Amino acid sequence: MSKGKLFVIEGLDGSGKATQAKALAAALQQQGCAVREITFPNYASPSSTLAKMYLRGDFGDRPEDVNAFAASSFYAVDRYASYKTDWGSFYEKGGILVADRYTTSNAVHQCAKLPQAQWDDFVSWLFHYEYELLGLPAPDAVVYLSVAPEISQKLMTERYHGDESQKDILEKDLAYAQASRRAAAYCAARLGWKTVECAADGAMRPVEAIHREVLAVIQERMERETV
């Protein structure tokens, strides 16, 4: 059988990725598609240990204390283990995967640590590393959920009921979030991601309105490939 499809929902922390990934998967299932959701890091697996150590500050309390290449490797190895032990066979047999984060998150969050003049080279290295050297599938489409860091920070504070100590080293660093937003805009433009604006007038748009836009992007992509 032909290989399946991989659709990625990308965005900064607090942008609603999990909600939109779940809604997209449900909509595709209702259309009769064989669909699975995957999310990264895969916190339920021991393969995410290095990523968890990084996020809780074991290697330093600032994101930049771990360089872009080392941090990328933490997440890439977790993805590789997940692919080999969990969802790889489903994809290889033609299933559709909806991913909450993927290699695309490495592109966004690790570019934020580098001078912009190095972003092109880093993204080229990253995709060669994960898609060619590790053999992970490349996405068929990426939807980037765009939310200003100030709004996403507020949403995360509400998620943790005001307990700022629950935030990891990325979530609590507003300057890093702002740098990641600039990197995400670059990635979306350079790599052909579809951007969905998730906020208006300083507040999040309705979940269903965002979902309709996300679903339209994916359906258009699927229809284009069946022509």
Image: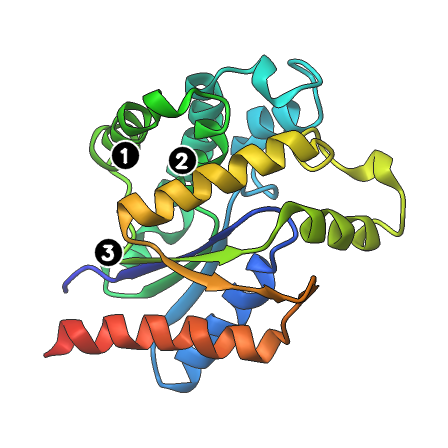
* Mark 2 neighbour class, 10 Å CA radius: few under 14, some 14 to 19, many 20 or more: many
Q: In the picture, which quadrant includes the N terminus?
A: bottom left
Which sits in the foreground, 69 or 25? 69
Q: CA distance from mark 2 to mark 1?
A: 9 Å
Q: In the picture, which quadrant includes the C terminus?
A: bottom left
Residue 63: name its quadrant.
Answer: top right
Where is residue 43? Give x, y as percent.
60, 41
Q: Amino acid at mark 1?
A: Phe
* Mark 3 neighbour class, 10 Å CA radius: few under 14, some 14 to 19, many 20 or more: some
Where is residue 179? Give x, y as percent.
54, 33
On residue 127, the disc is: 1
Query: Would you name the residue on which mark 2 appears?
Result: 107
On residue 92, the disc is: 3
* Mark 1 neighbour class, 10 Å CA radius: few under 14, some 14 to 19, many 20 or more: some
Residue 152 located left or right of residue 147: right
Which sits in the foreground, 189 or 7? 189
Q: Does residue 105 appear in the picture of this structure?
A: no
What residue is drawn where x is 75% and y is 55%? 155
